[in-house]
Amino acid sequence: MESPRTPIITLPDGQLIGTRDDDIAVWRGIPYAAPPTGDRRWRAPQPVIPWEGVRVADRFGAAAWQDAQTCRDIAGGDPGTFDEDCLWLNVWAPAEVSADAALPVMVWLHGGSFTLGSGGLAPYDGRALARRGAVVVTVNYRLGLLGFFAHPALQGEDISGETWNFGLLDQIAALYWVRKNIARFGGDPRNVTLFGESAGGRSVLSLLASPLGRGLFDKAIVQSAYTLEDESAEKAQARCMAAVRHLGAGIDSDAATLRKLPADALCAAGMPFTMGPVPICGDRVLPQSMMRCFMAARQHPVPVMIGSNSDEASVMNFFGIDLAQQIQRMRRERRLGLGLIRMLYPGVRNDAELGRQVCRDMAFTTMGYIVMQACRRRKVACWRYWFDYVAAGERERYPHGAWHGNEIPYVFDNLALTPPVNDCAEASDRVFAGQVADYWTAFARWRPGQATILDGPLRWPASGPGHDGVLRIGVRRCAGFKLERRFMRARARLFRRVMRHHVSLD
């Protein structure tokens, strides 16, 4: 950082001036790649176009094309304006630090089923984490059909190999930018923690599985990632061809013709044509599926924190999944394992509640167990958590526990910025949020070679040989922390075996 008082940064591409919020400097809307427009649509991100003079970085860049109302309803708030020119990132850092401060770096990948979201949403504001001594980066990346596109017309265009997961390539380009530039903001380019929730958590797992993600980050936090298999190349190609036919393009349209399709039309294509909630398997970014990679423990060997929430099944309503019908279908089809599954949920009698818990554990909880086992085989530390806190004023609204995404304002210590909890948060809720954020930044500061324990209200040891522990963050929806051994272990062991037969959106 060139001055401790004026947030002006000199990058290889030009100068930036940010803003100052008390003790935090913020730079918004920093380009990390060239606009992916025109002939650059459906190509790997290209280098930033340099600029003259001092660029004012005081507002967020445009979000990727998406459905604004759906983002406001379920994905974190108002994403603002849309543009195909969406490859921007934002940085929060302590203002009174020098360029050689070497602070831990936390890079956030937003969720939203790979079709929604933006790094500029209010819950992701990085001030509170920066006040804990971190440099925080949030990233926009291409979404939907503009970010994940496997049409045969693109075949052979990329000399590096088949490329379909352009949104993941954007995330990789942002991580290259961080390695190259973050020291100028006071961050340590050799202590980068990549973290994300839902599709953001799934992105973190994908980059741990991708050969292109090697060496770009040092630790990973995975929040509420899911066990759905990546989409096959065959299904993705069929979906993309159906989408362009739906938009009026001929079946034999070449790439140049497809690149002239309006971005808003591609965004509005909707289900079943659009992308989500998983990337595509089989290109140079994901040569094999993420799940197969972790099952075989072939992921990059970096330390991981991973966990999920107590009512993750809440998100399944978005995909039109009737939880009771999942149990009824298993009974009707006489699927292997229903009797054993019932034994693992003693006291649960009705199909709706059984479906809620089984879908939660099969699609979310088991992911933490799989990753923990893979980390153990790669001999790297893994911390597991289970988030079950609901603010006192929201317990009627969330009677079954913490919904999908409800942990985010606690991780960022941003209750005041996150509706609806901002209207009812009490002092005790804010204290609890501060404790959760402390754990996340403790992980960001942690380095290999240190004792595998994170300090907080409860000392949190990593899982290891003979220790399969989970930190319960919130106990029965109330404040508290509890270490639990063999947490849902029998369920996770079973679901690891049978989930391929049960976990799908079909």
Image: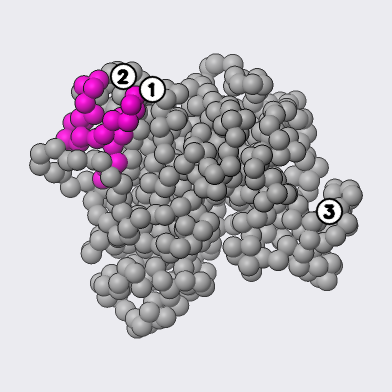
- The percent position of residue 255, horizontal first and vertical second, equals 29, 71
Q: CA distance from mark 1 to mark 3?
A: 46 Å
Indicate the secondary structure of the residue bearing disc 1. Answer: strand
Which residue is the site of mark 1? 103
SS majority, magenta: strand
Which residue is the site of mark 3? 341
Q: CA distance from mark 2 to mark 3?
A: 54 Å
Q: Give the residue displayed 34% in from the left and 81% down from the top.
A: 249
- What is the crowding at mark 2: few (fewer than 14 residues within 10 Å), some, or many (at least 20)? many
- What is the crowding at mark 3: few (fewer than 14 residues within 10 Å), some, or many (at least 20)? some
Examine the structure image and report whether residue 26 is included in the region drawn in magenta. yes
- The percent position of residue 139, horizontal first and vertical second, equals 38, 45
Q: Give the residue displayed 46% in from the left and 68% down from the top.
A: 274
Disc 1 residue type (three-letter): Leu
User: Mark 1 and 3 residues: CB-CB less than 8 Å, in contact?
Assistant: no
Q: Which mark is residue 97?
A: 2
Task: Determine the image quadrant of residue 382.
Answer: top right
- The percent position of residue 244, horizontal first and vertical second, equals 39, 77
Q: Note whether 133 is above or below 54 in the view shown.
A: above
Q: Earlier in the sequence, mark 2 or mark 3?
A: 2
Please give the count of numbered marks on the rendered protein: 3
- Split into 4 quadrants, where in the image is the N terminus? top left
User: Mark 2 and 3 residues: CB-CB less than 8 Å, in contact?
Assistant: no
Disc 3 residue type (three-letter): Ile
Task: Determine the image quadrant of residue 395.
Answer: top right
Q: Which residues are magenta?
A: 3-31
Most distant residue in the top direction: 450
Q: Earlier in the sequence, mark 1 or mark 3?
A: 1
User: Mark 1 and 2 residues: CB-CB less than 8 Å, in contact?
Assistant: yes
